[in-house]
Image (cartoon, rainbow, N blue to C red):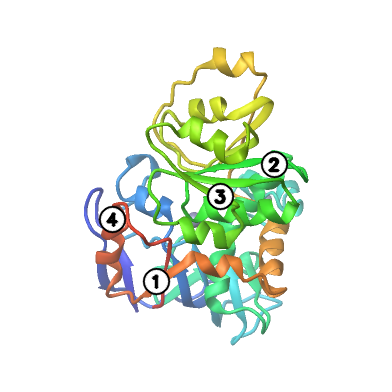
C-alpha cells in the first residue's frame, strides 16, 4: 500500500510503499477515506517528546471503510463506514467501561491514518450513518477534543468566553460554546487568517492585536471573560489567560505545551482563578460530536480548507509548519 512515513526529527515525511496490513485476531482493517493532519502530528516530527520512530505512520484523525476482519471480531462487516477513535485501550477495565479510555493501563495513541489501509480494533470503530461523510468522520476527533474541554470548563449559559488560538481546536471550542448558549464568544489570534471561519463557527467577534492582546479582548467582550480557553500551547499564554479572566473565572488548558511554562502564581492566586486541564475526550463525547454532525450541524465542516493526496502529503505537511491560511487539511489516500 501507499503510505507516508516518519523518517527522523526535523526531516520531511516520505511517500513510500509498505506491505498491506493483515488483521490478527480482534483486529479490523480500515481503508482510509479521509485523515486529518493534526497540529500535534506537526509537533511529532519536531519534538523528541513524542517518541516517533523511523517508519511510523502518523495520522489519528481518520475515517474509512472496513475491508478486512480478523478472527473473533463481532459487530462489524466489510463495507461498514467507520470513524476510528484513536485511543487504543483494553476495552474491558473499569476506565474503559466508563468510556474514559485514556486512563486504561493499556492506553496508547493510534496512528496509521496517512496510508491507504490502517489496522485498528472494533472497540475503536464508530459506525457512520448515511447522513455523514468520510470527511465528517475525520473531523470528529478534533470536535471531541474541544467538546471535552468545554464540558470540563463548567461553561454556563450567559458566560462570556474568550478562546486563545484560531486553529481547529480553538474554532471547535467556539462552535460548542455557542451551543451552550453563552453570552459573547471572542476568538483571539495573532493573525487574521481565520477571522471569517471563526465567525462562521460561532464566534461573535475576532480579535487580532498582538500589541495589546489583553486590552483589545476586554474591549471586544465588554469586560473580562468568565472562561478563557487556551488553545495554542506556547509559554506565556497561561499568564495572559489569567490576566484576561474574571476574578474566580476559569482558565481551561487545551493547548499542549511541550516546554516548561513558568506561571505567575501570585496573579493567579490573587484572582482565585480555577485552572483546569483537558486531554483527549471520552467515548460518549466522541459519539456526541458525531451526533452533532449527523443532526446537520454545518459549522464544523467549515474547518476543512483543503484535501490532498498521499503523494502531496509530505510537502503539504511541511508547509503547515509555518503560519498559513489553512485550517484543517484532510488527506484522501
Ligand atoms: Zn488530533
Ligand atoms: Zn481498559
Beta carbon at label 4 within 8 Å of ligand 1? no
Q: Which residue is mark 1?
A: 306
Position of 80 relative to 36 (above/below)? below
- Sequence-wise, the earlier of marks 4 and 1 is 4
Q: Position of residue 219 (x, y in %)?
A: 55, 36
Task: Let me know if residue 110 appears in the view.
Answer: no
**Pointer 1 with pointer 3, Cβ within 8 A:** no
Ranked by sequence position, the earlier of labels 2 and 4 is: 4
> Residue placed at 47% from the left, 76% from the top?
32
Residue 171 image label: none
Q: Which residue is mark 2?
A: 152
Query: The C terminus lies in which quarter of the figure?
Result: bottom left
Secondary structure at numbered mark 2: helix
Element at label 3: strand
Q: In front: 205, or 87?
A: 205
Residue beneath label 3, please? 205
Residue pictured at 59% horizontal, 19% vertical = 268
Distance from disc 2 to disc 3, alpha carbons, whole Å, reads: 23 Å
Q: Check residue 54 in the rendering and tell me which mark sits there, or answer none.
A: 4
Amino acid at each position: 500500500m501507499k503510505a507516508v512515513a516518519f523518517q527522523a526529527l526535523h526531516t520531511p515525511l516520505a511517500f513510500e510503499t509498505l506491505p498491506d496490513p493483515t488483521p490478527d485476531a480482534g483486529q479490523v482493517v480500515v481503508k482510509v477515506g479521509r485523515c486529518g493532519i493534526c497540529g500535534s502530528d506537526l509537533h511529532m516530527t519536531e519534538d523528541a517528546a513524542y517518541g516517533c520512530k523511523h517508519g511510523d505512520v502518523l495520522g489519528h484523525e481518520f475515517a474509512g471503510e472496513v475491508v478486512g476482519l480478523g478472527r473473533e471480531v463481532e459487530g462489524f462487516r466489510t463495507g461498514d463506514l467507520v470513524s476510528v477513535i484513536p485511543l487504543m485501550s483494553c476495552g474491558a477495565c473499569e476506565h474503559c467501561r466508563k468510556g474514559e479510555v485514556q486512563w486504561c493501563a493499556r492506553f496508547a495513541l493510534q496512528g496509521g491514518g496517512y496510508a491507504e489501509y490502517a489496522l485498528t480494533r472494533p472497540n475503536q470503530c464508530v459506525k457512520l450513518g448515511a447522513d455523514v461523510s468520510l470527511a465528517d468522520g475525520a473531523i470528529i476527533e478534533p470536535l471531541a477534543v474541544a467538546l471535552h474541554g468545554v464540558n470540563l470548563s463548567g461553561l454556563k449559559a450567559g458566560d462570556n468566553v474568550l478562546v486563545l488560538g484560531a486553529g481547529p481546536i480553538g474554532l471547535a471550542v467556539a462552535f460548542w460554546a455557542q451551543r451552550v448558549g453563552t453570552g459573547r464568544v471572542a476568538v483571539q489570534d495573532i493573525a487574521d487568517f481565520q477571522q471569517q471561519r471563526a465567525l462562521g463557527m460561532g464566534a461573535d467577534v475576532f480579535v487580532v492585536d498582538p500589541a495589546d492582546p489583553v486590552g483589545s479582548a476586554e474591549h471586544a467582550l465588554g469586560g473580562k471573560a468568565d472562561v478563557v480557553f487556551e488553545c495554542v500551547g506556547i509559554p506565556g499564554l497561561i499568564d495572559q489567560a489569567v490576566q484576561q479572566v474574571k476574578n474566580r473565572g476559569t482558565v481551561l488548558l487545551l493547548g499542549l505545551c511541550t516546554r516548561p511554562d513558568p506561571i505567575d502564581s501570585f496573579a493567579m492566586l490573587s484572582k482565585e482563578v480555577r485552572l483546569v486541564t483537558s486531554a483527549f475526550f471520552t467515548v460518549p463525547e466522541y459519539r456526541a460530536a458525531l451526533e452533532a454532525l449527523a443532526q446537520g450541524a454545518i459549522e464544523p465542516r467549515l474547518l476543512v480548507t483543503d484535501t490532498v493526496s498521499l503523494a502531496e502529503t509530505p510537502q503539504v505537511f511541511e508547509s503547515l509548519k509555518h503560519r498559513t491560511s489553512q485550517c484543517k487539511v484532510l488527506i484522501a489516500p
